[in-house]
Amino acid sequence: MSLTGLPLLIAVAVLAVGAAVVTARTWHRRGRGRALTRAAAVLLTEVLALLAVGLAVNRAEGFYPTWGDLLPAGTGRHDTEPARAGRLDRWLASRSPTPTAPVAFPWHPPRGGRWPVTATPTVVVPADYPQHPTRRYPVIAVLADHTTGPGEATAARTVEQDTGPVIVVFTHLRPGAGPTVLTEALPAGLARDLRVTSHSWALIAPADLTGLARDVVRAAPARYPALALVDDAPEPTGLAVPPDLPATETVAVIGASTHHPGRPADRLAVALRWACRQTPVPLDGPAPLIPPPPQAGSPSTGG
């Protein structure tokens, strides 16, 4: 059964109600061990009720779209299940039957305003995404700050045209945001809305968020095996690779000494191009074709 499917939710809810009914009917029975039996029955009923509530919330919010997402962050997993259609697949297909350029749009994650962000994330989806409903795509997560902005989606579109198909998401996190946003919340939200792989992503971070980037790749090395650090200073600052990174981590430092000292936006393009080359090709798998609806909808998926 699917973790977000209605059959599982109904089954657990029925078991919870059944356990409650059995507990009530057997409550006044006499016999040895009556206190222990009552306690066990009450505990079982409570566990099933809480599980049903948790499944209902997960179905609505999409925190854990698949059973594999229940594994600890960073645990290696293989995308062996059939590609499940994302909630935005139909909307993306409606925009253009045969798009010729990557599609950028503001993305509203399942948890909406409860995300620690200062601006709505921007997602850039490959041009061939609607034409390949059986593919899962790798992701480049960009920790955006003042060095990026309106031109970030344009940079992602330009880079993809000479690299390869990959989904790019720009996140504008508030100061003090923890790594779980990138290791848990972001992957769960993207897996709900789009067809993405569960591993082999890339992370791009500006110099002032190096600490957060280090914590993210240390917590989820299988998901983020590639890290690009972008120095936004006009002159070389000696930005160094953070210590204690996983031995399997591939790191690139992009600064004034490597590309256009006075143009930090160009360094983002360099970082995106490098990250694209670190991600694998999209994974194929069986999935149903999603025909486009008569009219375009909205990319908003959460409150």
Image (spheres, helix red, strand yellow):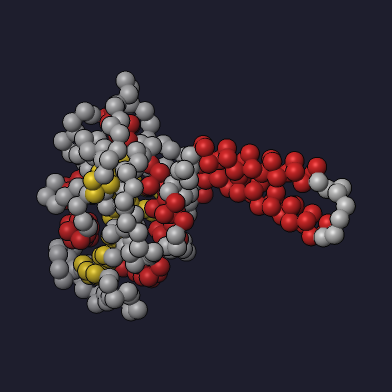
Residue shown at 33%/79% (left/top)?
243
Q: Position of residue 130 (x, y in %)?
A: 24, 35
Is residue 45 positioned above or below 287 on the image?
A: below
234 vs 40, nearest the viewer: 40
Q: Position of residue 112 (x, y in %)?
A: 48, 44
Q: How many marks?
A: 0
Residue that sits furthest to the front in the current view: 31
Residue that sits furthest to the top in the current view: 294
86 vs 13, nearest the viewer: 13
Quick check: can you spot residue 149? no
Task: Say which quarter of the image contains residue 87.
Answer: top left
Q: Position of residue 51 (x, y in %)?
A: 60, 49
113 vs 263, nearest the viewer: 113
Residue that sits furthest to the left in the current view: 162
129 sits to left or right of 121:
left
18 sits to left or right of 279:
right
Residue shown at 77%/46% (left/top)?
23
Quick check: can you spot residue 87? yes
Is residue 242 positioned above or below 40 on the image?
A: below
194 vs 169, nearest the viewer: 194
Task: Say which quarter of the image contains residue 174.
Answer: bottom left
